[in-house]
Amino acid sequence: MNILDAMRSRPDWRVCLLLPLLHFASVKLTFSLALSPENEVVVWLPNAVLLAALLHYRGERAALLALLAFTSDVCANLPVFLPLQAVLLSLCNLAEVLVTFLLMRSLGASPGLERIEDFGRFLLAGPLLGALSCALMAGAVLLTLDRVTAAYPTLVLLWWFGDGLGLLICTPLLLAFLQPAREAMVTQWRDRAVLAFTVVLAGAVFLQVHATDEESRLALTPHLMLLPLVYIAARCGRRWTALTVALIALTAAWSQTSGFRPFGEASPHEMILRAQEYILTLSIIGMGLSILLGEQRALARELEDKVRERTSALAESNRKLAELSITDSLTGVANRRRFDETLAAEWTRARRSGEPLALCVLDVDLFKDYNDHYGHQAGDECLRRVAELIRLHVRRSGDLVARYGGEEFVFISPGVDADSALVVARTVCAALQERALPHARSPFAVLTASIGVAAMVPGGDETAEQLFRMADQALYDAKRSGRNRVVQWTPGLANVVSTAHATGIATTV
């Protein structure tokens, strides 16, 4: 786990060091960008720093984080307020964050604000109720200041709107960057063009000096910034939308407090309210749209994952079903259907390549007597053992072992001539006898098998059925000659007979 991952998982010493620094910096940023000459704050950012930390770490070590933020807040307020007033105002800010955090927890809001309903609960708990509770307390504290002449309702409204907007702007931004990005953002040329246009438009909107002459005034309103913001929300995701909202909001606040007056001519107090209304609209539209689209993309990805999972499961089921349809359920080797398909395919391939194709047909000797004597369960176990033995010796990658029916097995060996196939068949026949599986009704006293072998290079009008008939005829000759032997089919019934005995294999021509 790297440092960033560790900071995302728990508030360790790095978080405890970074939190007050970031909180203090946000206070100074607010005073430098969003404080009007009349000492009215358009947006108050610092409370969002502690709230984002509490939400991200789900309240873990909340007391320590709150103490660090409170200390930073007092230190930042001391140059502006008397010590007692700085402490009281910092307590109001701390109460705002704690009320918001507890309300969001009681409402069941996800701390990541990744769903639109969670964003709605955040708006209710933070900018509305949390900021209002703080404003009611802070308004009373501000009345104790000598230089404050505004009425209590005005002080409450100013504090409420400033704190609420600060939470609305900064909290989603910090949470978005605290969480790992779900997907990498890939920008295209049109995205870069929109970003460049946004910068140019922001300069034209927020750096214009509002002229008193209606004819010379440039009719560009800050609401034009909603157009590129909607594009960014649709294309770039929640993280970059939150950053864009914060930059536009702070630029609007700075422009208003620096005398550019992008919202027109009015009293200072009314101009602050216009800026705050604009920032409120900008934030809710931008973040709401981004979260809604992100949620839809997440649902689409989840649906795609489920479809992919179901497709994979279906493919696996189809594979197993196909395997079952070509596998003998008793012995586990290929069944008759698979044998017929493979024989036809290998015959075609052998005809095309000019290579030989060998086929062996094996029949368990006196299997009906074995079944009658030992029972059907023993007979099934006998067939399984025979299939296992054949697979043990017929194991080339292109070979196929199949149960043809009853006690009869076949195995195909592509690219193998008659002599090589005969050697393999002899090995199988001898290995079965060496297993010495008891067979009370056999003249050999053990389980044995007879095998017919045939091989040919396909050509002319010959068919795969002819190859099978040749191997089957050789098997018939092996059984007629006394069983427990291998017979190779040759033209003119010139058969080579191998007779397997307990002490070895004797070959008779």
Image: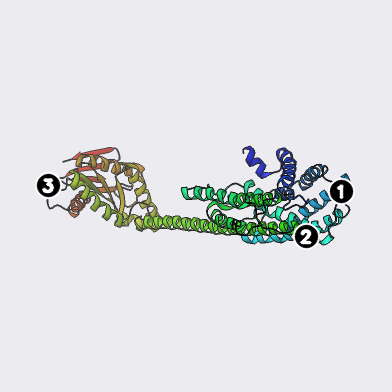
Q: Secondary structure at mark 3?
A: helix
Q: Secondary structure at mark 1?
A: helix
Task: Decide which of 44, 466 is in the foreground and name it.
Answer: 44
Q: Is residue 459 above or below residue 317?
A: above
Say which residue label 1 marks.
Answer: 85
Amino acid tagged 3: Pro
Q: Badge 3 local density, few (<14 within 10 Å), some, or many (20+)?
A: few
Task: Decide which of 217, 170 is in the foreground and name it.
Answer: 217
Q: Is residue 479 above or below residue 2?
A: below
Q: Badge 2 local density, few (<14 within 10 Å), some, or many (20+)?
A: some
Residue 260 in percent (x, y) is at 67, 51
In which quadrant will I find the N terminus? top right
* Residue 482 visible in the snapshot: no
Say which residue label 2 marks.
Answer: 157
Residue 201 in percent (x, y) is at 56, 51
Q: Is residue 149 above or below residue 506?
A: below
Residue contact between numbered discs 2 and 3, judged by CB atoms under 8 Å: no
Residue 494 shown left or right of residue 232 in the figure: left
Amino acid tagged 2: Leu
Residue 141 in percent (x, y) is at 86, 54
Mark 1 vs 3, N-terminal side: 1
Mark 1 or mark 3, whichever is nearer to me: 1
Name the residue at the left extreme: 492
Task: Decide which of 403, 84 is in the foreground and name it.
Answer: 84
Q: Quadrant of residue 104?
A: bottom right
Residue 81 in percent (x, y) is at 84, 46
Task: Decide which of 153, 134 is in the foreground and name it.
Answer: 153
